[in-house]
Image (tube, helix red, strand yellow):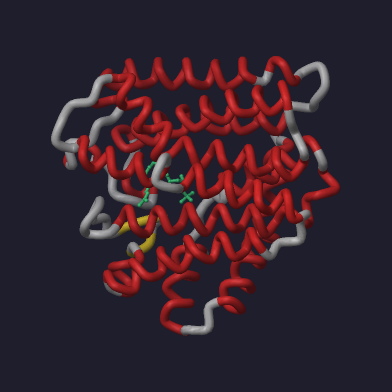
Amino acid sequence: MTTKLTRLTTEMVPALDSLLTMKIQHDVPDETLQSAMAYSVMAGGKRLRPLLLLATVQTFLPGQIPQSLQAAAAIELVHTYSLIHDDLPAMDNDDLRRGKPTNHVKFGEAQAILAGDGLLTLAFQWLSDCQLAAEVKVALVHELALGAGPAKMVAGQSEDIAGEARQLTLPQLQALHEKKTGALIKASILMGADIAGVQDYRRAALTKYAVNLGLAFQIRDDILDVTSTAEELGKPVHQDEAAHKNTYPGLLGLAGAKDSFNKAIAATRLALDPLVASTDITLFEDFADYLEK
Ligand code: GRG
């Protein structure tokens, strides 16, 4: 079945990909750095976070989609930086990502660190020079810095690494996931809301939706690490257990993790209730359906 999200993806991913390719080429004059940055950005990611921003704009103010593409692409830069650094020998020490050698395997550790640094900084350059009103750009910079920065994603990564040595409780694990993975997902949706001028009860509903979607996403990732093959995921599996990571299946068993996933998905859908009377929520429902497949 062709869903609204499939149509948005078919239309937007090629546009995002060509913007990412062209602007990295234009904005990164050093050839080695440009290759290392482009390698991971163009390695076949699903573009989930940019699509969340664009789906939010499409739902509330579709006329702003063309001006939103660069902001959506900026989120993918931050996401890609986080994956490059996460894969480094000093962090998860992974050799495979998206079915390809990781950045440091291909370009060496120093260039991989710099590629990540370059992507993180370039994201904010793109937000500051995109075609949106100045006050919207400030809101976007703030939202992305909050979600990706030292109070959220970086803190989550730090806690994840520190937590390898000890068993977290379920609330501690949920808080860690909310920072490490959830915060960027939430920022993506709220940045869409900033562009579309979504406020009050609608922004509150979107925030609740985003938090629960992010949680469902991470629990699903934990489950897939246990149940999938490396070919299916394009990255090594059973890594979490080997690294003594705190995960949902590790803490609750596979059945318990699946139960938590189902609860997070139910909460994701419930969060949309206040919007139903005024808004076509199909795109948001499609993301929940996608995670459930
Ligand atoms: C290094 C500061 C810093 C942060 C890293 C995101 C992150 C924090 C670590 C990644 C660990 C991980 C694999 C978490 C699982 C959730 C996740 C981010 C999966 C990858 O995202 P997808 O599925 O990937 O959207 P694609 O390849 O489609 O972009």
What residue occupies the far right of the structure in this picture? 63
Residues 219 and 272: in front is 272
**In the rendered image, the vertical position of residue 241 relative to residue 73, given as above or below:** above
- At a point 28% along the width and 25% down the height, the residue shown is 249
Q: Position of residue 161 (x, y in %)?
A: 23, 43
- At a point 37% along the width and 27% down the height, the residue shown is 175
Viewed as shown, does residue 22 lie left or right of 96? right
Residues 103 and 236: in front is 103
Q: Quadrant of residue 282?
A: top right
Residues 288 and 160: in front is 160
Residue 211 shows in the view: yes
- At a point 26% along the width and 55% down the height, the residue shown is 94
**In the rendered image, the vertical position of residue 45 relative to residue 203, given as above or below:** below
Viewed as shown, does residue 221 lie left or right of 190? left
Q: Quadrant of the N terminus?
A: top right
Q: Position of residue 18 (x, y in %)?
A: 66, 67
**In the rendered image, the vertical position of residue 157 relative to residue 251, given as above or below:** below
Q: Position of residue 239 (x, y in %)?
A: 24, 43
**Total count of labels:** 0
**In the rendered image, the vertical position of residue 80 relative to residue 146, given as above or below:** below
What residue occupies the far left of the structure in this picture? 165
- At a point 71% along the width and 21% down the height, the residue shown is 201
Q: Position of residue 90 (x, y in %)?
A: 21, 57
Residue 232 shows in the view: no
